[in-house]
Amino acid sequence: MKMNENFFISKAIDPLPYESNWEAPSNIALIKYWGKKNLQIPKNPSLSFTLDKSVTRTSIRFEPSKSGKFNFKFFFNDSLKPDFDDKLHVFFDRIKKYVCWITNYELTIKSINTFPHSSGIASSASAMAALSLAIMDLESYLFNFEKNDFFFTKASFLARIGSGSASRSIKGPVTIWGDNRKISNSSDLYAIEFGKDLNSIFKSYQDIILLVDKESKNVSSTKGHDLMHSNPYAEKRFLQARRNCDSLIPIMKSGDLDAFIKIVELEALSLHAMMMTSNPYYILMKPNTLSIIEKLWDFRKEKNIPACFTMDAGANVHILYPSEYEKQMIPFIDQELSSFCKNKEYIVDQVGAGARKLD
Ligand code: DP6
């Protein structure tokens, strides 16, 4: 069932102390979300692989507020991190309408990531997803409901309000966020699972993340989305993404890898084309990004292995391939691609099942 915004507004209730621990993964988009309106209402649908090992673990201790006012403290890797306070304040202000009971609490939030900072893995996606799940955990306790579809859908809805791509980090192995005509229950407000028709080849897909550059990006995703408002190619891009999503959906069912590769690589390069045609223009790829792409294309042609690349808003390259090619891919990456990475570093990940509650 498709839910509208009113489904997600909860009532007020007296506070109770509670603690919740969740782990949520990052994700890598195959159809890219780039351009939005209002609070992360996407201009086109997006589709992603949920990752497995690249996760955020978050615990929240909820205490009834002594001052009667909402407050929080945020710790990252066991140290108090006030740098994130502004972003978190904005998030809590935005979600209060939907979880109004939260205003009676003081929160102690503790987070860690299993992947390095600025590694090109979307940490805001896993972080906002884990946070939203811990909040939903308390809501389900207070209002006494199961961790059912509504639970995870509202978690995705709240995560979207924190960061658009976070909506896709609740479930796995493949999720879709954004209204599209191929899937009737898809929504701009939250992501849904691709579902049981997903071809089994995609359930164990590998993702090797080549760390070309570990510096912070000089143009943030927030700014990048904003520049789409004045990009002369924006409307065409949204149309292209919509069509690519329509084409990719049957491919995710059939497992046609040649067709998969064509769409996934086109999406990655189209995302970066939008950066290059924004005003002001910018380039996030580095020379090594292009060297990796060329090497991969040569290797694919020579060995006939269906490996392809995608990219986030950064210089790093994700190499995607079916798990059966691991024996050929790992030596290739080690010997031919790792020299293009900072300190030869890369992360070995794969498609995962989604977030989980920790004991
Ligand atoms: C290139 O979700 O980080 O990774 O909604 O402003 O927080 P905000 O942006 P964000 O944008 C992600 C952009 C992308 C593509 C994608 O994940 O679909």
Image: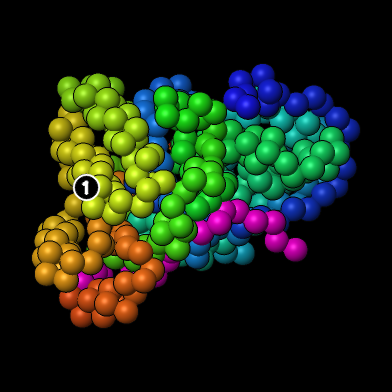
Mark 1 is surrounded, within 10 Å at the Cα level, by few (under 14), some (14 to 19) or many (20 or more) other residues, namely: few
Compared with 201, 62 (above or below) is: above
- Describe residue 168's horizontal placement relative to residue 62 as left or right: left
- Residue picked out by circle 1: 262
> Does residue 211 appear anywhere in the picture?
no
Range of the magenta residues? Answer: 337-359
> Does residue 323 appear anywhere in the picture?
yes
The part of the image, by quadrant, that contains residue 269 is top left
User: In the image, what residue occupies the spot 36% across and 52% down?
Assistant: 255
The part of the image, by quadrant, that contains residue 98 is top right
Scheme by which the image is coloured? rainbow
Decide which of 218, 247 is in the foreground and name it.
247
- Describe residue 143's horizontal placement relative to residue 231 as left or right: right
In percent of width and height, residue 251 lies at 34, 45
- Which residue is farthest front? 254
User: In the image, what residue occupies the spot 63% across and 27% down?
Assistant: 1
